[in-house]
């Protein structure tokens, strides 16, 4: 019985550690000055910060589960689908709209999600 109690204690401690790490991550995400969007491999939005809501004019519930192309003008949707699949196979930091003063940057998270951040580019 002692081994089981020790295991349960370790599981409880680890659960608390994970909850703290998630809270820290979400706090960092929310404090970012740029819009930050995290998608799954299918391009569905799984996480975003409040700056995304402010910049794009959607509320969180409207975006979660929708394709990231929702945030782009319709004329870019088809081409972006191609870029997104290329990014999934060869992830790296890249500017998405380099010709504009404000644009998008793509990154790949360790968990395998790709994301975008809309911010100032000088």
Image: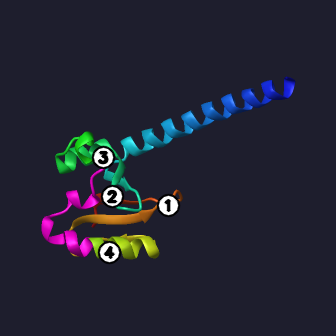
Name the side, left or right, on which 25 lies relative to 81. Answer: right
Residue at 66% over, 35% down: 14
Give, as a single range, the part of the protein colored magenta: 64-80
Q: Residue at label 1?
A: 112
Q: Residue at label 4?
A: 83
Q: Position of residue 53 (x, y in %)?
A: 23, 44
Q: Are marks 4 and 2 in contact (CB under 8 Å)?
A: no
Evaluate whether residue 92 shows in this view: no
Which numbered disc flags the more N-terminal residue, 4 or 2? 4
Pointer 4: residues within 10 angstroms few (<14), some, or many (20+)? Answer: few
Q: Where is residue 99 in the image (x, y as percent from the top left)?
A: 22, 75
Query: Which secondary structure lies at badge 2?
Result: strand
Residue at 55% over, 34% down: 19
> What is the number of the mark on residue 117?
2
Determine the image quadrant of residue 80. Answer: bottom left
Q: Residue at label 3?
A: 64
Of residues 1 and 118, the one nearer the viewer is 1
Of residues 17 and 54, the one nearer the viewer is 17
Name the side, left or right, on which 9 lies relative to 108. Answer: right
Determine the image quadrant of residue 38. Answer: bottom left
Which numbered disc flags the more N-terminal residue, 3 or 1? 3
Mark 4–mark 3 Cα distance, whole angstroms, equals 21 Å
Mark 3–mark 2 Cα distance, whole angstroms, equals 16 Å
Query: Which secondary structure lies at badge 3?
Result: loop
């Amino acid at each position: 019985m002692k081994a089981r109690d020790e295991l349960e204690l370790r599981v409880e401690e680890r659960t608390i550690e994970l909850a703290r790490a998630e809270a820290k991550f979400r706090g960092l995400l929310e404090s970012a000055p740029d819009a930050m969007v995290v998608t799954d491999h299918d391009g569905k939005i799984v996480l975003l910060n409040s700056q995304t809501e402010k910049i794009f004019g959607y509320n969180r519930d409207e975006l979660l589960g929708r394709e990231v192309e929702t945030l782009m003008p319709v004329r870019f949707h088809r081409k972006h689908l191609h870029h997104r699949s290329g990014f999934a196979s060869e992830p790296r930091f890249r500017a998405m709209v380099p010709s504009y003063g404000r644009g998008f940057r793509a990154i790949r998270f360790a968990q395998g999600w790709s994301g975008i951040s809309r911010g100032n580019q000088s």
